[in-house]
Image (cartoon, rainbow, N blue to C red):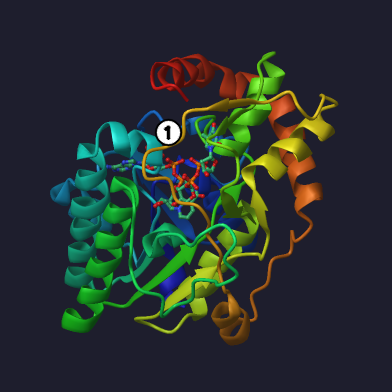
Amino acid sequence: KDEVASLLVTGGAGFIGSNFVRYLARVNPQAKVVVLDKMTYAANLHNLDGLSRKPIVIRGDICDSSLVEQIVKQHHINGIVHFAAESHNDNSIRDAAPFIHTNIYGTYVLLEAARRHDLRFHHVSTDEVFGDTSVGDVTKFDESSPYRPSSPYSATKAASDHLVRAWWRTYGTRVTITNSSNNYGPFQHVEKFIPRQITNILTGHRPKLYGQGEDVRDWLSVEDDCRAIWDVYRRGRLGQTYLVGADNRLSNLAVVRMILAMMNRPLDEVDFVRDRPGADRRYAIDASKIRRELGWKPLQADFAESLEATIEWYKRHESWWMPAKQTTELRYRQEGH
Ligand code: NAD
Ligand code: TDX
């Protein structure tokens, strides 16, 4: 019970973290929530607007161990839900340094705080740690899949997962991990695939597909992911990893065509651009364990319906995404994407 009284949510001003804080405000309104966020380019304080009970927001770096120590003591933190990360593969290819710093060292700092104060610790990770399969493949990743990360980003997430497991095995720190597939939904930065294509169309540009658009992603609504994270935080077995996915695998081209159709554009209004070096081809998640052990299942299983809702959200929140759009596209243009 104590574990839910006072929670430190790292990266709570980013995409999934802020959706999680909003979700918590609905399902656990009595909890005290402290957000620790460095407010990088990926963060936006407006993500936390409109909540009747405001979280405490602290601008700071998870790598700052004295700050983390002070927050844990001052706010009587019982548990950490750790979202903070550098999260975009393309950025990690350009410059891996902040990924190594935040994703690896930052996770270490938080684990040490959890160990010192016997905090419950949940680590939010990605299916990308398992690498990819080829496009025609039908196999899925599960909790026993070997680690085989491809990009600097996914290598740092793999490293952070290993640290979390080591703290469980060595110190008995009360950890869990979720590795989830590609999220989509409100408050996602315009650098990411789905928001980029929607906002391209809204600004009079064509969607941009890397390579031939054949890569497959297993799309999961952010709301379903947040519920999975909360289920695992409260009821998951300590020391365990849970994979989260909604069995919704589509090629990038198929997703772009859905977006074009929903936005009343011709289906061939697409540019094929330079592929990502070392690009992962296909992700697929077997979520049987979380379904079986915790009874979790995706509630937003109708991808077309949730995609429409996401498009509507971006239409209605132009002032939220417009400030980031130009700089994001400038960077993509410089890199041939
Ligand atoms: P995001 O980039 O939208 O948000 C990351 C947040 O972390 C930002 O608010 C940023 O300011 C903050 N942050 C970065 N460095 C920090 C630091 N040193 N100290 C404190 N705060 C810092 O990312 P997201 O898409 O919301 O992803 C959140 C987590 O979920 C990440 O750990 C990511 O690896 C994982 N994940 C994401 C997806 C996805 O599809 N987006 C899928 C699976 C797992
Ligand atoms: O403009 C684009 N065109 C395009 O075809 C962009 C931005 C991407 N793509 C392709 C690359 C991928 O095949 O779309 C796919 C998805 O790309 P991203 O949105 O960059 O996501 P991905 O690289 O799959 O990683 C995401 O899911 C796992 C998140 O960014 C990670 O944080 C998470 O761990």
Residue 284, percent from left and from top:
56, 64
Please name the residue shown 28% across and 55% down the image.
Answer: 155
Q: Position of residue 108 (x, y in %)?
A: 19, 59
The furthest residue to the left: 66
Q: Residue at x 67, y 40 (%)?
A: 253
**Residue 333 locus on image (x, y percent):** 45, 17
Left or right, residue 47 beside residue 86: right
Q: Tell me the quarter of the picture where residue 112 sits.
A: bottom left
Q: As shown in the figure, which amino acid type bears the numbered disc 1?
A: Ala
Q: Secondary structure at mark 1?
A: loop
Q: Is residue 187 visible?
A: no
Q: Is residue 72 above or below residue 266?
A: below
Within 8 Å of ligand 1, the CB of disc 1?
yes
Horizontal side, residue 41 vs residue 16: left or right: left
Residue 152 place in picture, x, y as percent? 28, 47
Say which of 251 and 61 sits in front.
Answer: 251
| Nearer to us in this view, 221 or 280 | 280
In which image quadrant can residue 204 be found? top right
Query: Dot 1 corresponds to which residue?
Result: 42
